[in-house]
Amino acid sequence: MKVVNYGTVMVEMAEKEKASMHRDDMRKSSLAFQHKLQKMAAEEILRRSSSMENGVLVVDTHMMVKTPSGYLPGVPSHIISILQPSLIVLIEASPEEIKARRMRDSSGRMRDKAVAEEVEFEIHLSRTLASGCSLLSGAPLGIVENPPGEAAKAAEKILNMIEALGG
């Protein structure tokens, strides 16, 4: 199993385009540039995974990104057609927990202020977009809760979903 973070690959692609930027600056770039990075990253992920025989590739990403123009799908239809997922898993936490995690984040990210109502809307929007990804790809959709201190349980549920694909 290999896990690839889509945003990290997008940052790498931005650097190839001579656009060195902080991870959070990407979402403030032009939509055309973000679309270009999404496509380049998907193609790069596919290229890197082509050497995997019978392995499982997990692409860790967000269902949407808040931009100055509005919410941009993290996995739009043209990316679905490139990656062709066999399973979509949405990992969730409560709005309160998401807000707390964002406030505790000391990674240097330049996050927007977390507002409870907005977090609730983002959870709803993520579910809607994940459903759309499932519809477009034909891949089943699973939703896994990730409450504090229970990451191992969430990971086990995801592994069970992956194993069920082979049956």
Image (cartoon, grey):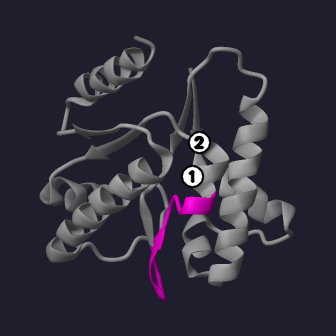
Residue positioned 85% across, 67% down in the render: 17
Residue 148 placement: quadrant: top left
Range of magenta residues:
66-78
On screen, residue 89 versus residue 110, left or right, reads: left
Residue 66 sits above or below residue 152 on the image: below
The residue nearer to you, when weighing 34 against 100, is 34
Residue 147, given in percent of the width and then of the height, sits at: 17, 39
148 up-or-down from 56: above or below: below
- Nearest the viewer among 160 and 13 is 160
Circles 1 and 2, Cβ within 8 Å, touching? The answer is yes
User: Within 10 Å of the Cα at label 2, are there few (<14), some (14-19), or many (20+) other Cα atoms?
Assistant: some
Residue name at image x 40 percent, y 15 percent: 163
Residue 71 versus residue 83 in the image, above or below: below
Amino acid type shown at disc 2:
Gln
Please tell me which residue lies in front, 165 or 38: 165
* Residue name at image x 34 percent, y 23 percent: 161
Q: Quadrant of the N terminus?
A: top right
Secondary structure category for the residue under label 1: helix
In the drawing, what numbered circle is on residue 95? none
Compute the Cα span from label 1 to label 2. 5 Å
- Residue 124 lies left or right of residue 88; in this view the side is left
- To which residue does mark 2 refer? 84
Amino acid type of disc 1? Answer: Ile
Tell me what residue is drawn at x 86 percent, y 69 percent: 18
The quadrant holding residue 19 is bottom right
Identify the residue under disc 1: 80
Task: Give how far across and how far down residue 103 sits, in percent.
Answer: 28, 63
Q: Secondary structure at mark 2?
A: loop
